[in-house]
Image: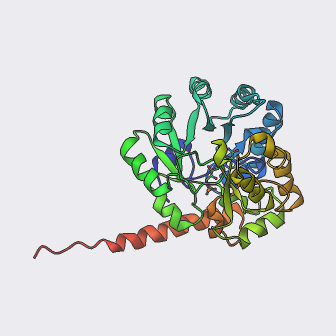
Amino acid sequence: MIITPLTKLLGIRVPVVQGGMQWVGVPRLAAAVSEAGGLGILTALTQPNPDALRTAIHETRKLTSRPFGVNITLLPSINPPDYEGYARAAVEEGVTIFETAGNNPGPLIKFFKSNGCIVLHKCTTIRHAKSAERLGVDALSIDGFECAGHPGEEDIGGLVLLARAVKELKIPFIASGGIADGRGFAAALSLGAAVSTRFMCTVESPIHQNIKDKIVASTETDTVHIFRTLNNTARVFKNKVSLEVVAMERRPGGAKFEDVRELVSGTRGRKVYENGDPDYGIWSAGIAVGLIDDVPTCQDLVGKLEREVEEIIAQMGKLVQIQSKL
Ligand SMILES: Cc1cc2nc3c(=O)[nH]c(=O)nc-3n(C[C@H](O)[C@H](O)[C@H](O)COP(=O)(O)O)c2cc1C
């Protein structure tokens, strides 16, 4: 067993967190990850309204009695969702672990902390990590540039970002971005790891089998950044639609959000997971796709991560030899 401050803080057996995933972080997946010993996370905004989140929480509880969390992602939006309503609903339903991500999380963090909850805040810069620390979060999830979804605008890879985090942060943090197997997990293991793209490709993940097969067939060169020129970078799967968005951003004069709105619509992206057509819309994926070559159950995946990390740590221990002073 691997015991870290994270396993103690969250009451989980394996220090693996399934990070929030829009349209993917649903009860079946979150419960399966928690049942396997990690921390499953429901993605609040995947539910159409706070009441639907309540139902999702009930459904998750029917599937697991182990701890699970709720992710609330604050992103720039023309019509902001009812973040407060989602947060209140989850707290009223007894959820005590939250993953927050995105802009201006202060009020949300304050609300969760005043209700005695544990808050894990996701950041892509040390500056943001420090302000979340000042806001009183319990732990941070440090997302390197390898990650799926929003890597921020400063492009710092995980190795450097995490080394800086060790030096600068006082509170515990987990590593996130590009971790999909025991090697990445072992490298991250000062505390634990957040793993997302890998969990998309499990039996319990709610996405269409064709998309799981597509991920298995992909390499680390199959993702691309969109919205770089709009200062809202997102790493997504490289397909017809994302390449068209990038081409529009690169044309003389660039592109405004209005020009790409139809191409990047969330509804089209969601359809990909339902109809199994990888070219139907924009969908998030990290470069960890290059490390994925099967579709295991969450139980088998977390068990394998645990075994691999133990083997690697044991092997690494053998690299250190005490030199005789004689
Ligand atoms: C399909 C998908 C959807 C995601 N949606 C969200 C989201 O809604 N909110 C969020 O905070 N992070 C989201 N992420 C980012 C993950 O929580 C995590 O930070 C990142 O994917 C870690 O990198 P990895 O995929 O290489 O493990 C998403 C990731 C994926 C793969």
Horizontal and vertical percent position of residue 125? 50, 43
User: From the viewer's perspective, is 105 left or right of 48?
Assistant: left
Q: Nearer the viewer, residue 188 or 178?
A: 178
Quadrant (top left/top right/bottom left/bottom right) for the C terminus: bottom left
Q: Is residue 233 visible?
A: no
Q: Is residue 238 above or below residue 141?
A: below
The number of discs equals 0
* Residue that appears at 72% across and 64% down: 297
* Residue that appears at 54% across and 54% down: 193
Q: Is residue 17 above or below residue 323?
A: above
Horizontal and vertical percent position of residue 149? 66, 50
Horizontal and vertical percent position of residue 227? 68, 47
* Residue that appears at 68% across and 36% down: 75
Q: State the colouring used for the structure image.
A: rainbow
Q: Is residue 154 visible?
A: yes
User: From the viewer's perspective, is 11 left or right of 268?
Assistant: left
Task: Name the outermost residue toward the front.
Answer: 252
Q: Is residue 315 above or below residue 234?
A: below
Q: Quadrant of residue 313?
A: bottom left
Task: Name the outermost residue toward the left.
Answer: 326
* Residue that appears at 52% across and 61% down: 185
Q: Nearer the viewer, residue 271 or 238?
A: 238
Q: Quadrant of residue 210?
A: bottom right
Horizontal and vertical percent position of residue 296? 71, 67
